[in-house]
Image (cartoon, rainbow, N blue to C red):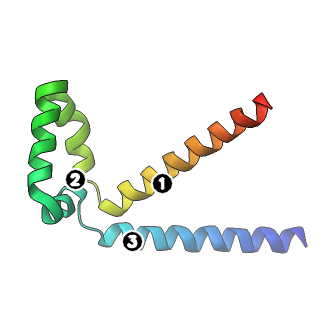
Amino acid sequence: MAVLRMVFLLLAVGSGCVALWATVAGAPPLGQLWFSVDAPSLNLTQALIQRYLHPAVWDTVVVPLLVQPSALVAFATAALAALAAAVTARFARRRR
């Protein structure tokens, strides 16, 4: 029975990876999507980051994110949020 569970688990993970790859491959870059939705806010964000943080932050952090497929950035953000929720839940359980 454990072998059958492992086979189904591997099939589920494999099909999930294929679905994720198909979604990411067809997604437009994040910068293009942001520009099509609200171009002035993209320009304002660039100006604010370059003026109040540092121009290198825009060039080395934000621009590489903007050229990534939008689905990949969304999945990565969701994964980081889930990880943060798990960590905070674990620390909250320890305090009780």
Q: Tell me which residue sits at (23%, 60%) in the image.
A: 29
Where residue 39 appears, as percent x and y from the top left, is 10, 57
The residue mark sitting in front, 2 or 1, is 1
Residue 31: image tag: none
Kind of element beneath mark 3: helix
Residue closer to the observer: 46 or 27: 46
- In primary-sequence order, the first of circles 3 and 1 is 3
Choose top left, top right, bottom left or bottom right for residue 15.
Answer: bottom right
Dot placed on the residue nearer the N-terminal end, 2 or 3: 3
- Please tell me whether residue 17 is drawn above or below residue 87 in the rendered image: below
Label 2: state its secondary structure: loop
Question: Residue 74 placed where, x, y %?
Answer: 39, 57
Q: Which residue is mark 3?
A: 23
For mark 2, does the 10 Å Cα neighbourhood hold few (<14), some (14 to 19), or many (20 or more) residues?
some
Under circle 1, the secondary element is helix
Kindly identify which numbered label has been placed on residue 78: 1
Mark 3 or 1, closer to the camera: 1
Q: Amino acid at mark 2?
A: Val
Nearer the observer, 69 or 53? 53
Label 2, on which residue? 67
- Whether residue 54 is visible: no
Q: Are marks 3 and 1 in contact (CB under 8 Å)?
A: no
N-terminal label among 2 and 1: 2
Q: Give the CA distance from mark 2 to mark 3.
A: 16 Å
Q: Residues within 10 Å of mark 1 (few under 14, many from 20)?
A: few
Task: Name the quarter where the C terminus is drawn.
Answer: top right
Looking at the rendered image, the quarter that the N terminus falls into is: bottom right
